[in-house]
Image (tube, rainbow, N blue to C red):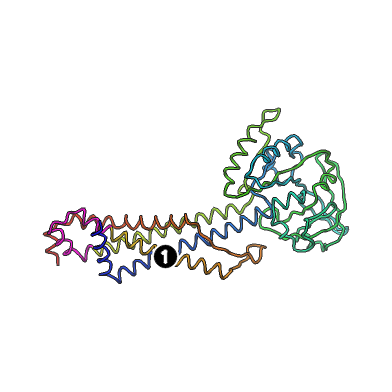
Amino acid sequence: MLNIFKLAMRNLRRYQRRTLLTSVLISLGVVAVLLFISVSGSFKALMIGQITDSMLGHLQVHQKGYLASIDSLPLDRNLQEKQIAKVKEILDQNRAIESYSMRIKLGAMFSNFTETTNLRLNAVNPEQELRTVPMLTERIIKGKKEGLLAKGEILVPELIAKGMNVNIGDTIVLVATNKEGSVNGQPFIVRGVLEGISGPGGRDGIIHLQDAKSLLRIEGNEISEIAIRLQDIKFMDRIFADLQGQLGPIKNKMDKPVFEVHTWQKLSPFFNIARMIDLMTLFIKTMLVAIVLVSIMNVMIMAVYERINEIGTIAAIGTVPNKILSLFVMEGFLLGVFGTLIGVIISLVSIATMNASQISFDFGRQKGLLLSPTIAAGDVITVCVIVVAIAVLASLQPAWKAAKMDPITALRHV
């Protein structure tokens, strides 16, 4: 095997221009794939962080059927006290869960005493909410950020604040209808203005949980949803399955499921964009395979054609076909290794350069987001293995042709 390796290296050095061009072509494919994976992965992770850490959380628990009718913000599908206690008991026992926040979602009429419009509201416990969605305060573009808000205060969406000329410190009135049909109004002080965010929730205001209970005349403990933050989002699928396994079997008196659990993917339209990014990554990898396959096969076919006399000579002196086949496969393998090695080095240097440059971009209403491309060792290894494997496969057909060549015919070739 060592002799075959030496011969393969010698043959690659003999045809330096062809070897260099093929290695460069393979390297370009590797660089394209690794840079795309790192940049797109960074963009996707950044967007997921923006959505989960400033609004949704990683998981949410609702009463069964709530999500299907969430557009109308139904108050008759709120979780009741015993149901809340059961969910809290399960969440408190799971060490992978960092925090959770109780919320009441409701619709209300928003009035500045001159104009009136409709508004969606998230009623939260400030301490719980800040632990569960720690980037929420970054969306406050006007007003105090510390502590989020107090009782009697409201955070108003930017679009409504601009449209109705509402400023910090102004008094507004919220009018809401509870599930019994009773209408109630309550004054609030504008604490701050919330920047919009892409997807549902971009027009939601925020009030204190106790204010929502007062406005809706809710007695006792009652909430619309429980937002959950995990220690690490990588464990989301496992925790989701665990919660479904624990909450799913619980039935009400009518023998129907009580709870439903959803990941952020179900709750945000950005998941479709994330899937498109994954699809594009697969497409780029497929293109890499095609580039490597065509490049190596073309080089090896030309190598066999140009070295027919050489193949006839080594066959005539007793070299067995398997050795000839191994020689050409080794050349394909080395081409794949050289091209991949160069591509990986260029890619890692490029990623480090981009991180040092601190590239920022805008996404929707989010401004100045910092792109931090990273790539996992597993992705690098996967790409390397794919490229080298395809290089070997591409060299098999020309190598097989060389190994089966008749020595006498090959020696007569001019």
Image quadrant where residue 335 sits:
bottom left
* Residue 251 at x, y percent in the picture: 67, 30
* Residue 62 at x, y percent in the picture: 69, 41
Residue 246 in magenta stretch: no
* Residue shown at the point (83%, 41%) measured from the top left: 218
* Residue 9 at x, y percent in the picture: 27, 64
Left or right of 103 on screen, residue 58? left
Residue found at the very far front of the displayed protein: 2
Residue 307 in magenta stretch: yes
Image quadrant where residue 306 sits:
bottom left
Image quadrant where residue 244 sits:
top right
* Residue 1 at x, y percent in the picture: 25, 56
What secondary structure is the stretch in magenta mostly built from? helix
Q: Of helix, strand and loop, which one carries label 1?
A: helix
Examine the rendered structure and indicate whether residue 372 appears above or below residue 53. below
Residue interval drawn in magenta:
304-329
Q: Nearer the viewer, residue 122 or 235?
A: 235
Left or right of 3 on screen, residue 95? right
Amino acid of disc 1: Gly
* Residue shown at the point (58%, 46%) measured from the top left: 235
Q: Quadrant of the C terminus?
A: bottom left
**Residue beneath disc 1:** 343
